[in-house]
Amino acid sequence: ARPVKLSDYHVPDHRVTNVDLLVTLHPTATRVVAKLTVERHPKGRPAAPLAFDGDELNLVALTLDGAVLAASAYEAMPDRLVIHLPPAGPFTLTIETMVNPEANTQLMGLYRSSGTWCTQCEAEGFRRITYFPDRPDVLAVYTTRIEADKAEAPVLLGNGNLVETGDLGNGRHYAVWHDPHPKPSYLFALVGGDLASTSDRFVTRSGRDVALRIYSEHGKEGRLAYAMDALKRSMRWDEEVFGCEYDLDIFMIVAVSDFNMGAMENKGLNIFNDKYVMALPDTATDQDYAHIEAVIAHEYFHNWTGNRITCRDWFQLCLKEGLTVFRDQEFSSDMRSRAVKRIADVRLLKAQQFAEDAGPLAHPVRPELYNEINNFYTATVYEKGAEVIRVLKVLLGPAEFKTGMDLYLARHDGDAATIEDFIACFAEASGRDLGQFFLWYRQSGTPEVSVEGHHDPKAGTFSLDIRQTLHPTPGQPTKQPMVIPLALGLIGPDGAERPLLTEDGQSVPGVVALTASRHRFVFTGHTTRPILSINRGFSAPIRLTTDLTEADLQFLARHDGDAYNRWQSIQTLASRFLIASTAAIARGDAALVSVPLIETLGAVLNDAGRDPAFTAQALSLPSEADIAREIGSEVDPDAIQAARLALRRTISDQLGDELVATLSGFAAKGPFAPDAAAAGRRAIANVALDLWAANGTESRLAEVERRFAGADNMTDRFAALAILAQHAGTRREAALGAFYERYGSDPLIIDKWLALQAGIAEPATLDRIKTLLANPAINFGNPNRLRALVGSFAMTNQTQFNRPDGLGYGFLVDVVLDVDAKNSQVAARLLSAFRSWRAMEPGRRGRAQAALIRVANAPSLSPDVRDIVERSLG
Ligand code: DPP
Ligand code: ZN
């Protein structure tokens, strides 16, 4: 029954403790025999019928304790199996179903990707394989026997440890896998196919010798070494930092090309979208390497936070996702530069989650109601879910946070837990009341915090007046004040950090916590005015406004001891300027010019040697979408773009010498290495190249073209191509053509080429996209291809998706309606690009609304798309 409500939760009436599967792989008729040990749940409703979930299932046979059931004793529908009067004691149910992997275009359940059989069961895919109580609080021990043709599927993989293999004659064989760890059905997986692999070993801290294997299609096994290296580093790190050790004899990753998500943490058998596994210097950018490292770690870390401790129900999704994102962020911070990682994470949070929180799709980190759970794998659950854990860590401090985390891992091992269970561990470990903190899970929307500083030279005080507000969001008309930890510092004009002293002489550690709507904090010892640095390290996921002047921000950009806030100060300077310039352009005036901003950027460039990766982030201006979000309503994307382009041209013209110096200072030296330091040098060089070429001078573009042709790695080659793509003309088309010539047979690289063209900010782009979409050499039935072209267009091309004539919206709707019948999850995800439509100026708003209404009125929508369209219009 939809919608599903958290408040309706009750334990299952029946649970399954043991699952014995026999899967006979066939392209179109795979037979599944599931032998289940079933018992009543002691807390279930005593006389309840047995009701198992199904989805497009075909029942072939059914027995209970070996006896065939009378037709009147049960009802089998595609989406449900009901046994009216099940026995009271434990019994064995044997269910035979037939599924068609070849026809499974939803990519949920058992399907084929380039000839390989594979599965995806989260959230509700297992019910497309057999009838089952398909909910995360039903934990069972699984044994999987897979039978297949030897030539078609020499490799047969399942969860857990391999216990038996053998020959069946007639060119067929089998493998039996046993997973001793009870798990929910969403963690089930199997793979069968003709795959290549790379192997390694890892010895855990208690001496368990673990075989590591990564599988890919033949010919791509040479691209797996970095993923393997990242896996071993993840395994060691999780032991050292969280005390989590691996618990099976083998850990496997299989890369497949058709995949809805990024990757999936099935027990012992992770299945990955191939874009997060394969990398060589000539095929992957530095950003790809960083993503691979993070996703490999993320899925591996789920073994404890997700698998050993799973979720009671899908409302608790952030219990495993927010926590595991937090863990993978920490891992990447330890592997690379912590400050640069924080900046990248905050950029992503603002771009994705703040946008979601500000529009009709806003929902709490822990939702209380859903129509379609697939639509809740969101930036709010993942990225804000991770921020909330960071808030908890700032509030408690690292020591108490660790005690709470250790308690959680020990107490709930083997459980299907809730957010309440998780928070109770931290409350107990710290002795604190975390009731108000819990609002971070319940209230949606981004808190807005405004800060005003007052200096009284006579009294020697500096006081802060701080207010917080949280605007209404869908389903939540009124809100309570949140607990918001603000890390802060007061800096003297000499650049020295001053102690934080209160009026009664107490020294404050570097954090104040807001608990009410208004606060005043008074600090003493300031005969001269200090400069405030606040929300250091982005200690709370809030929208902050301050009364810091342009001069203050310039000062902080140079002197703040907190690297995150050095970056934020530059962003704030640029953002304030671009908003003002956008307004000027919208009035019909010329774009503005900012001397302080150019000065600051020049100073940053001159200091690039201090931390090249940081400098690259500091020079990356707020995106058009960032500016749109800051403006918040009546948005005109064309005016924003004009303001931003004008600023880029000014930088190009006025800082040409500094940019050239940076370019030559960070020119590549020696052979390619994917490590953070080398990546940082490439990042600053490419940002400098981009800004240097931004004025479109012929000679500068010729230099970019030369670098494109001469690059010896994908990072530099693609960066040059991206610059050329911004400037219309034969040079661009020639470079795009050469890139396709070189990589046309390499789909993951073609994705980059597609995304780049989808992002070109000119009216001809829509036709370019339509032409690409009609190219028979590119398989747009593959989710990665479709997302690269259409998803990038709708999510990143502000001016062209939001064309004033509405054709961008119309195009997306056409694609969504077409894809919905084949893959509703991908369709729903594409449609969520409308999440900011209400913030547009009236003309575009009207056209977006009309486009959404066209979706709503279309016949036979999937539940996924219906849910997104109804909430978007709601
Ligand atoms: N595979 C997805 C993730 O790891 C969903 N669990 O986030
Ligand atoms: Zn995850």
Image (cartoon, rainbow, N blue to C red):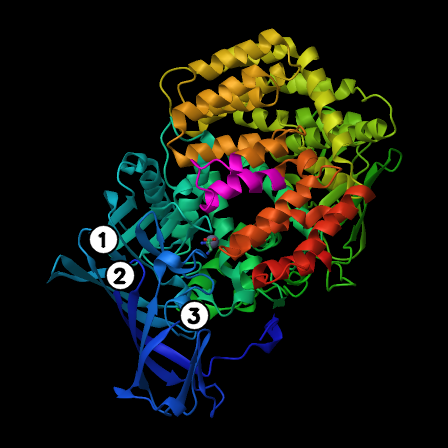
The residue nearer to you, when weighing 602 against 149, is 149
- The number of numbered badges drawn on the structure is 3
Q: Where's the N terminus, which quadrant?
A: bottom right
Where residue 464 sits in the image (x, y, percent)?
80, 43
- Residue type at mark 3 is Asp
Q: How far apart in space, not on screen, are marks 1 and 2 (Cα)?
A: 9 Å
Residue 563 as seen in the image, left or right of residue 721: right
Q: Residue at x 52, y 61 (%)?
A: 317
In the image, residue 809 above or below residue 365: above
Residue 789 in magenta stretch: yes
Q: Nearer the viewer, mark 3 or mark 2?
A: 2
Does the residue tagged 1 have its C-beta within 8 Å of any atom of ligand 1?
Answer: no
Please tell me in which quadrant of the rendered image residue 375 appears: bottom right
Q: Could you classify mark 2 by the number of other residues whose Cα lies within 10 Å: few (under 14), some (14-19), or many (20 or more)? A: many
The residue nearer to you, when weighing 375 against 524, is 375
Residue 518: which numbered mark, if any?
none
Q: How far apart in space, not on screen, are marks 3 and 1 (Cα)?
A: 35 Å
The residue nearer to you, when weighing 756 against 45, is 756
Q: Residue at x 56, y 66 (%)?
A: 315
- Residue type at mark 2 is Leu
| Magenta-colored span | 772-795
The residue nearer to you, when weighing 839 against 508, is 839
In the image, residue 714 above or below residue 329: above
Residue 153: which numbered mark, if any?
1
- According to the picture, the residue beneath numbered tag 3 turns out to be 415
Where residue 547 sits in the image (x, y, percent)?
82, 36
- According to the picture, the residue beneath numbered tag 2 turns out to be 25
Secondary structure mostly seen in the magenta stretch: helix
